[in-house]
Amino acid sequence: MTDADGTRSRGNGDGAGAAAAAAPGPAGAEKVVEEEVVEAELVDDAPAVDDEVVEAEAAEIDPLIAALAERDEYLDSLRRIQAEFENYKKRVAKQQADQVARAAASLVDKLLPVLDALDLATDHVGDNESAEAKALVAASGLLQGVLAKEGLERIDPVGQEFDPNAHEAVGQVPAPDGVDPTPSGEPVVAQVMRAGYRWHGTVVRPAMVMVQG
């Protein structure tokens, strides 16, 4: 082999090596290398976490949280105060209503003897057609009408079945012939000796009656 051949051989060998070095590798290897480069760049570009900044942000958040908690506590206290005030108003209103009802019932109780006196006077008036008798009857009716509008109900149960809750039997009279007993077995009121009264549905005084026996 001549030197020229050797030179050509070496030249061919060097060319092949260079071509081999310059030849690109597999596509997967190039992708892996590119991803590693990108990840490295992302890691390098990420801002560094500053502990002082984090502490400063936390210091700004803490007062806000405290303020919100204080606001919630204030709202809860306000709701409790409002509820207590509403309950207080209801109690006061009920107490006032009870006081008015007791005062009215006391006044009615004091007026009952006056009504009894008027009933007695109208029952025993001599001349029903006289001016005095008419005036007395009118005054009695006017007073009872005013009290009735306020809630006073007169109990005058002649001919009704005896009710032990609203009537007080003080005597007995013979029952007329042919009168059938009542379904409940209670006697019938024959005569009212003294009228009874209810105040707003509550018996304040039972009627004093005579019953048929």
Image (cartoon, rainbow, N blue to C red):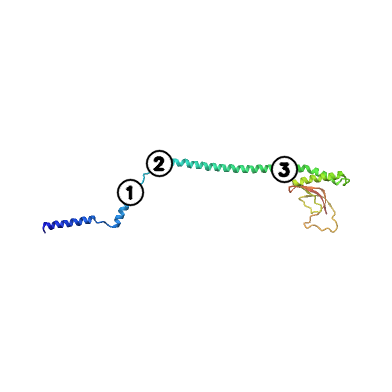
Drawn side of residue 14 relative to residue 40, left or right: left
Q: Earlier in the sequence, mark 2 or mark 1?
A: 1
Q: Which residue is mark 1?
A: 41
Q: CA distance from mark 3 to mark 1?
A: 92 Å
Question: Disc 3 vs disc 2: Cβ atoms closer than 8 Å?
Answer: no
Q: Earlier in the sequence, mark 3 or mark 1?
A: 1
Q: Amino acid at mark 1?
A: Glu
Q: How many marks?
A: 3
Question: Disc 3 vs disc 1: Cβ atoms closer than 8 Å?
Answer: no
- Residue at screen point 59% across, 42% down: 82
Secondary structure found at label 2 = helix
Quarter that holds the C terminus: bottom right
Q: CA distance from mark 2 to mark 1?
A: 24 Å
Position of residue 48 measured from the top left corner of the image (x, y, whole percent): 36, 44
- Residue at screen point 33% across, 48% down: 41
Q: Nearer the viewer, mark 2 or mark 1?
A: 1
Q: Which mark is residue 53?
A: 2
Q: Amino acid at mark 2?
A: Val
Q: Nearer the viewer, mark 3 or mark 2?
A: 2
Q: As drawn, which residue projects farthest toward the left?
A: 2
Secondary structure found at label 1 = helix
Closer-to-camera residue (80/44): 44
Q: Quadrant of residue 28?
A: bottom left
Q: Which residue is mark 3?
A: 102
Q: Quadrant of residue 180?
A: bottom right
